[in-house]
Image (cartoon, rainbow, N blue to C red):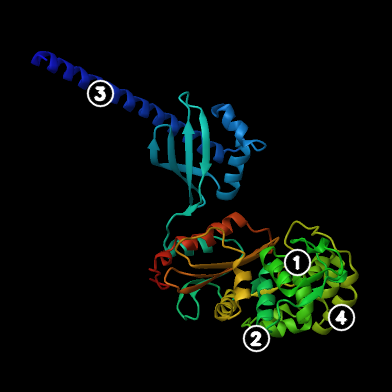
Amino acid sequence: MLPGKTMRKTVLILITLMSLSTLHASAQLQYTDQLKRAADLITVGISSPSVSIDEYFSSECLSALKPITVEDVLKNMHVQYGDALAYDVYSVENNAAVFMLKFNGGMAVPMGITVAATGKITGFTFGLPKVERQSINQLKEQVKSLRGDVGFLLKKIDDTDEVYSFNPDKPLAIGSVFKLYVLASLMDKHVNWATIIRLEGGLKSMPSGDMNIWPDNSPVTLHTLATKMIYESDNTAADHLINYLGRRNMPGLLDKLGNKNWNLSDPFLTTAEAFRLKNSTEAITEYLRLGKKEKYKYLETKVKNLPLYAPNFVTPREITTIEWFASASDICRLMSHFYKGTDALVSDVFAMNPIFMKEPDLTYLAQKGGSEIGVISVAWLFESADKTPYCLAATWNNTADDVDQQQFFKVVKGVFSLNFLHNTIVPQGK
């Protein structure tokens, strides 16, 4: 082949390759712009969930979602995380991209999007949320922003140094967190978890849980009752276990478990009694004017005959008098007791109720929460990557209005963004 022809052919090949490269870059740029527009739309859709953006999605995408809608998905994201403020582009490849959505609640959520050549969204998905890193000082400000009475303690198990505390010794209503005291009392009693007791109609309560609809006289093991009580917060299971331990024994058992405010939970109410009392203003008035001995008698003769139904009130009701009580320090002493326990079944039951997201840096996670109108509380026990055990106890009470659960969990989940996940926790005040 003549040299001139060879050169001309080489030049043509180079021009063709350059043209293809330019076309590919142009196509990629087009997709990138379309993907960003799609991310903009979804960001707006989350922050303004009443605005329909269905027209920007392909028919195949909308069909694949049925019976739910795009609006349903975005509303759920808004309920969980708040307003979507902005996003970062993590990666773009052809017609697909991964973004990191940032929410006003301090959460960051991965979002994957694919688009068609027309620009319509053909698919979208959300990953597990991540909490943006924060300092202890930021955590302090968030805790102090909770309106009402707050108790908060984050510390190593059995270490006098606290990572952070706020009113740690203030006794507050803890809702269903009291069920951990029932579980710990069973552990200390060294019960045979295979022991069978039978469900009694007179010991049934209202949900949460479903054991209230189980047939009377159903045989169940202590292990089943404990599992239902912790994993599903089953009230009927809790009341049967309180009865098994002896209701009048419970204040003394709280004392043994390090609850220095045990006297505030004496008499120790069953959940059914709490429902019945709080649904009757007449019963509340009568009960609160009685002394301790008279209260026990009143519960066991009068209150047990009151109608049992779901709460009929919408504002906090007697959360400083008719509840179960503990301080954050009390709860952390209880977490220490669980951590030292040798009953593997108890540890397994406790750990069945996981903290909201599995963190790879944490090797053990267990939690129990509790709430009613005006009350929310959590007790968390966990180990860092180097097996250092920590307790987090957080309670928020508001006698005037209901508490904002989304705001509360934004604060407590923020603990996982602190440096202790990477073994660099800083003592209080530093």
The answer, for residue 146, to whether it is visible in the render is yes
Earlier along the polypeptide chain: callout 3 or callout 4?
3
Residue 235 is marked as: 1
Q: Name the residue under label 3.
A: 17
Disc 3 versus disc 2: nearer the observer: 3
Mark 4, secondary structure of its residue = helix
> Callout 2 environment at 10 Å: few (<14), some (14 to 19), or many (20+)?
some
Marks 2 and 4: which is nearer the front?
2
Q: Name the residue under label 4.
A: 297
Q: Mark 2 points at which residue?
A: 256
Residue appearing at x 39%, y 26% in the figure = 30
Q: Look at label 1 and name its amino acid.
A: Asn
Residue 284 placement: quadrant: bottom right
Q: Which of marks 3 and 1 is nearer the N terminus?
A: 3
Give the Cα separation between the discs numbered 3 and 2.
80 Å
Q: Can residue 322 be seen in this view?
A: no
